Image: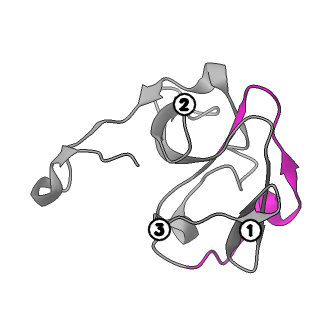
Amino acid sequence: PQRFDIIVFPFRYEDRVYYIKRIIGLPGETVQITDGDIYIDGEILQESYGREVIKDSGLAAEPIVLGEDEYFVLGDNRNHSSDSRDASVGVLKREDLIGRAWIRIYPFDEMGFVVHE
């Protein structure tokens, strides 16, 4: 998995519920969100996927050091997303990742392949 890939993983606390999020932090990196900015290893992450300034840093208000097989994910709708900032999701292990999302079917007027940078 690479940064900005859109991945699918199961929600830990409910059967047959899956989340789709974007990978932001990679194994071995330190992730922190301060004043709405995402920092990777102390440098601001240049990205354009978040639709709004992050209001709640959640767990990432403090630096999160990712292990050798851990990933930090965020939803693109940053202020209305359960993602790695939330303890119910947290940091994902490689074994948690089911796959990469590659096609969008809804909304119907945006149906097509998911573009990864």
Rendered view: 86 above or below 113: below
CA–CA distance between discs 3 and 1? 17 Å
CA–CA distance between discs 2 and 3? 19 Å
Q: As drawn, is 49 to the left or to the right of 110? A: right
Mark 2, Cα crowd under 10 Å, few <14 / some 14-19 / many 20+, is some
Which residue appears at 70% of the width and 45% of the height?
88
Q: Which residue is mark 2?
A: 1
Residue farthest left in this picture? 109
At mark 3, the secondary structure is loop
Please state which of residues 28 and 108 is positioned toward the viewer in this rendering.
28
Amino acid type, callout 2? Pro
Find residue 33 and report its horizontal and vertical position in percent. 75, 67
Find residue 96 and report its horizontal and vertical position in percent. 61, 24
Mark 3, Cα crowd under 10 Å, few <14 / some 14-19 / many 20+, is few
Q: Which residue is mark 3?
A: 48
Find residue 51 and report its horizontal and vertical position in percent. 45, 73
CA–CA distance between discs 1 and 2? 23 Å
Q: Which residue is mark 1?
A: 57
Span colored in magenta: 53-72
Please state which of residues 113 and 13 is positioned toward the viewer in this rendering.
113
Quarter of the image with the N terminus is top right
Amino acid type, callout 3? Ser
Rendered view: 16 above or below 51: above
Find residue 20 and report its horizontal and vertical position in percent. 45, 43
Which residue appears at 47% of the width and 61% of the height?
76
Mark 1, Cα crowd under 10 Å, few <14 / some 14-19 / many 20+, is many
Please tell me how many numbered marks the rendered image carries: 3
Which residue appears at 57% of the width and 32% of the height?
14
Please state which of residues 18 and 8 is positioned toward the viewer in this rendering.
8
Q: Earlier in the sequence, mark 1 or mark 2?
A: 2
Q: Earlier in the sequence, mark 2 or mark 3?
A: 2
Amino acid type, callout 1? Ser
